[in-house]
Amino acid sequence: MTVRYSGHVQGVGFRYTTKTVATGFEITGTVRNLPDGRVELVAEGAQAELEAFQFELRQAGLAGFIRDEQVIWTDAKNEFRGFEIVR
């Protein structure tokens, strides 16, 4: 799952909160700031787990910063170990 979040999502602890929330789920992936002001989340795991994770991000206080989220579903490539913030 790749999600690109837009809104006031940089400089508000979005990546840190995402990493913290990820520890409660059986997923792997990365979160990073994009040059255009969006945040990109790439995560792998079972679809139900990914959907629950995406929902929990909003519940963790991020909903007020998100104006839009573009979700793209693709097959997992098993390329991640853990969940990390990419700089």
Image (cartoon, rainbow, N blue to C red):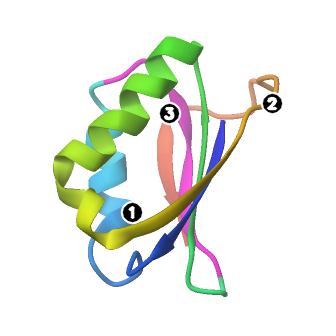
Residue picked out by circle 3: 82
Q: Are marks 1 and 2 in contact (CB under 8 Å)?
A: no
The x and y percentages for residue 9 are 40, 75
Specify whether 80 is left or right of 27.
right
The x and y percentages for residue 60 are 19, 48
Asked which secondary structure carries label 2, the reply is: loop
Q: Are marks 3 and 1 in contact (CB under 8 Å)?
A: no
Residue picked out by circle 2: 74
Q: Earlier in the sequence, mark 3 or mark 1?
A: 1
Residue picked out by circle 1: 15
**What residue is shown at x 66% (from left), y 86% (from top)?**
35
Quarter of the image containing the C terminus?
bottom right
Q: Amino acid at mark 1?
A: Arg
Return the residue nearer the eye: 45 or 59: 59
Asked which secondary structure carries label 1, the reply is: helix
Specify whether 20 is left or right of 34.
left
* Distance in Å between CA atoms under marks 1 and 2: 22 Å
Specify whether 64 is left or right of 38.
left
Residue 43 lies, with reference to residue 20, above or below; the image says above
* Distance in Å between CA atoms under marks 3 and 1: 15 Å
Return the residue nearer the eye: 15 or 4: 4
Mark whose residue sits in front, 3 or 2:
2
Q: Earlier in the sequence, mark 1 or mark 2?
A: 1
Quarter of the image containing the N terminus?
top right
Give the residues drawn in magenta, as a range.
25-34
